[in-house]
Amino acid sequence: MTGGSKRIKNLQIARPFVYGNIAVPLGDNRTETTPTDHTHSWTVFLRGINGDDLSGFVKRVVFKLHETYPNSTRSIEEPPFEVTETGWGEFEIAIRVYFVSEAAEKNLVIYHHLKLHPYGPDIEKQKESGSVTSLQYEEFVFNEPTEGLFDILTRKPDAMLPKQKTSRVPFTVAAENEELDRLAAAYNVVQEQIKKSTDQLKQLEAERASLQ
Ligand code: SLL
């Protein structure tokens, strides 16, 4: 079933991620080539949470910078999916995410406003530390994923690979049971993920509501 392009009906599977930027005033950290009007160094990024590696299903991430930047379309083919630059101004960055072909998913665009200057409720804290962070939590939600994508998303090398077989006969009751165990484990992983994501979403919604 690996790599299958058939879609699994009535299944939704999500993967959390964060995107955003950090920025620090350049201060004395200039090089010979830093343009004199540049005031900040910044990094825009998209990454998994808890060290999750997204590259199993994310093929590439393209960051579209302001046209004032040379080669303003930056294509990042492997993690870390990020771009570091210096500059003087804030602008909107289009982050286009491409998925691996097994997923048979359209690419998607996220817009991030590059933040260089502190503002909002955490202004004092950010002024103290000197660095500014603008982070957003999001989820990739795959509706009726292909079998190939499902396989990628539920692959857990340690927990899911069947133990080494001594027998040369591939089809045994034991092997079939292992396969069933694997499916059950994968199902549980998905259910847990859905629950975790739903809880996180609820919490974020509550936080947002309390901020409004
Ligand atoms: C503004 N609308 O006026 C925005 C534009 C452009 C940012 C910000 C430097 C690029 C370079 C840079 O920071 N561009 O010189 O390489 O605020």
Image (tube, helix red, strand yellow):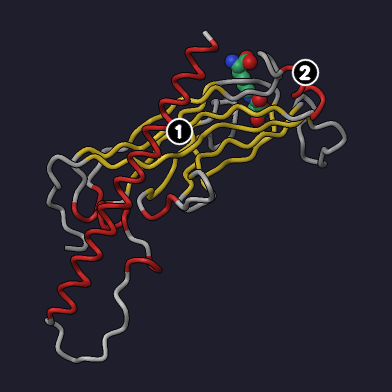
Which one is nearer the viewer's eye here, 129 or 175? Answer: 175
Outermost residue toward the right? 28
- Give the labeled residue for mark 2: 124
Q: Quadrant of the N terminus?
A: bottom left
Give the x, y percent position of residue 22: 65, 33
Q: Image height check: is 168 above or below 192?
A: below
Where is ligand 1, by quadrant?
top right
Outermost residue toward the top? 212
Mark 1, other Cα within 10 Å: few <14 / some 14–19 / many ≥20: many
Mark 2, other Cα within 10 Å: few <14 / some 14–19 / many ≥20: few
**In terms of image quadrants, where is residue 127?**
top right
Q: Residue at image x 46%, y 28%?
A: 94
Tell me how many marks there are: 2
Disc 2 marks a residue whose amino acid type is: Glu
- Give the labeled residue for mark 1: 95
Mark 1 residue element: strand
Q: Along the horizontal axis of the image, is 97 left or right of 35?
A: left
Quick one: label 2 or label 1, which is nearer the N terminus? 1
Alpha carbons under labels 2 and 1: distance apart: 29 Å
**In terms of image quadrants, where is residue 35?**
top right
Q: Nearer the viewer, mark 2 or mark 1?
A: 2
Q: Along the horizontal axis of the image, is 71 left or right of 15?
A: right
Q: Residue at image x 74%, y 31%?
A: 24
Give the x, y percent position of residue 95: 45, 33
Q: Along the horizontal axis of the image, is 134 left or right of 200?
A: right
Mark 2 residue element: helix
Q: Image height check: is 44 above or below 182?
A: above
Give the x, y percent position of residue 74: 50, 40
Give the x, y percent position of residue 8: 14, 47
